[in-house]
């Protein structure tokens, strides 16, 4: 694969695409503040080129993501649709609970309850559950996956299927990396527990993306995660634009073709282009 083109702005390649598939956390905001330059870039693409689909591994429904956007001054007119791993998990949960009430243990914080609210589910403990919904750590400010060894062992003892509503291992919150549901799911798999993942880089999430951009002939995926955004785009045969100032910011010493090629090779991914942060 050719080395990534280093961009000064999205305008350099925007004319080649008629839809954007843009990551949220790490591109539009860092968990503390929103990027108005990234918002402006999405606005301009919508005005001049085509649809903008936000694709997030947030374990939340659309309404909860849009509530969060208000805190970061991300306006609703910079995108056309939001697709999340939480939405995909909810679709599956709804199907599983269609014909009978399903007993579920929710592994995750209260803020993620929108994934399953209103569904035919009975929330219960590990001992009585038929299935586990994993949306993250209960308190990701202080906890790590090591704090969950006993809970995961109890789940494995009953061979409970875990639905992972966020494949990310970590996200950036301000200048700090925060553990996510994907790290718990990986720890569960390592002790033999069965897991189903939703969201990037799984191919099924891109079916929802394509349904949100009917008629789009060439998409560009934008993201900061090599193992999620870029790997998922590669598998879906969508060109990728890597944003360096995200979760890999500490590894990207130099936004140059040679250095990025080396990092991409280690991750087993490739990108059409790269830039430090999303700007038009």
Image (cartoon, helix red, strand yellow):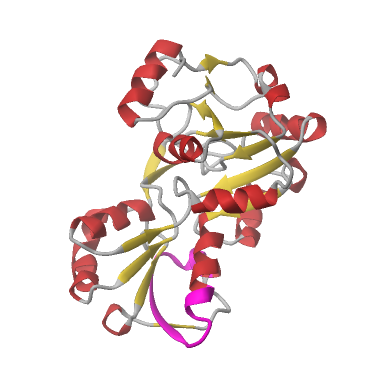
- 146 on left or right of 81: left
The stretch of residues the image draws in magenta is: 94-113
Q: Pick out the residue farthest to the right.
A: 47
Expressed as whole percent of the image width and height from the top left, the position of residue 171 reads 42, 43
Q: Quadrant of the C terminus?
A: top right
Point 51% across, 27% down: residue: 242
Q: How many marks?
A: 0
Expressed as whole percent of the image width and height from the top left, the position of residue 22 reads 60, 39
Quadrant assignment, res 153: bottom left
Look at the picture and state if 178 lies above or below 49.
below
Q: Is residue 245 magenta?
A: no
Point 53% across, 82% down: residue: 98
For residue 271, say whether it is visible.
Answer: yes
For residue 68, say whether it is visible.
Answer: no
Quadrant assignment, res 257: top left
Look at the picture and state if 165 lies above or below 117.
above
Q: Pick out the residue farthest to the bottom.
A: 100
Point 50% across, 68% down: residue: 92
Which residue is more in the foreground, 117 or 207? 207
Q: Quadrant of the N terminus?
A: top left
Expressed as whole percent of the image width and height from the top left, the position of residue 128 reads 30, 85
Point 64% across, 47% down: residue: 210
């Amino acid at each position: 694969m050719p080395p990534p083109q280093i961009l000064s702005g999205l305008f350099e390649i925007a004319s080649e695409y008629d839809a954007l598939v843009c990551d949220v956390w790490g591109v539009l905001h860092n968990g503390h503040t929103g990027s108005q330059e990234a918002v402006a870039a999405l606005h301009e693409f919508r005005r001049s080129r085509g649809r903008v689909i936000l694709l997030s591994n947030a374990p939340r429904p659309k309404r909860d993501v849009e509530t969060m956007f208000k805190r970061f001054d991300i306006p609703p007119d910079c995108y056309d649709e939001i697709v999340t791993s939480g939405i995909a998990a909810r679709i599956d949960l709804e199907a599983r609970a269609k014909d009978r009430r399903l007993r579920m243990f929710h592994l995750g914080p209260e803020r993620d309850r929108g994934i399953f609210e209103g569904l035919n589910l009975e929330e219960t403990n590990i001992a009585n559950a038929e299935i586990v919904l994993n949306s993250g750590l209960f308190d990701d400010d202080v906890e790590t996956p090591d704090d969950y060894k006993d809970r995961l062992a109890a789940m494995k003892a009953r061979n409970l299927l875990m639905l992972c509503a966020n494949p990310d291992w970590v996200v950036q919150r301000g200048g700090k990396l925060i553990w996510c549901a994907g790290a718990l799911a990986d720890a569960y798999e390592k002790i033999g527990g069965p897991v189903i993942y939703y969201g990037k880089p799984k191919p099924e999430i891109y079916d929802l993306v394509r349904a949100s951009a009917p008629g789009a002939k060439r998409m560009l995926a934008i993201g900061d995660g090599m193992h999620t955004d870029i790997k998922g785009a590669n598998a879906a045969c969508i060109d990728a634009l890597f944003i360096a100032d995200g979760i890999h910011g500490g590894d990207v010493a130099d936004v140059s073709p040679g250095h990025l090629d080396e990092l991409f090779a280690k991750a087993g991914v490739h990108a059409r282009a790269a830039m430090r942060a999303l700007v038009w």
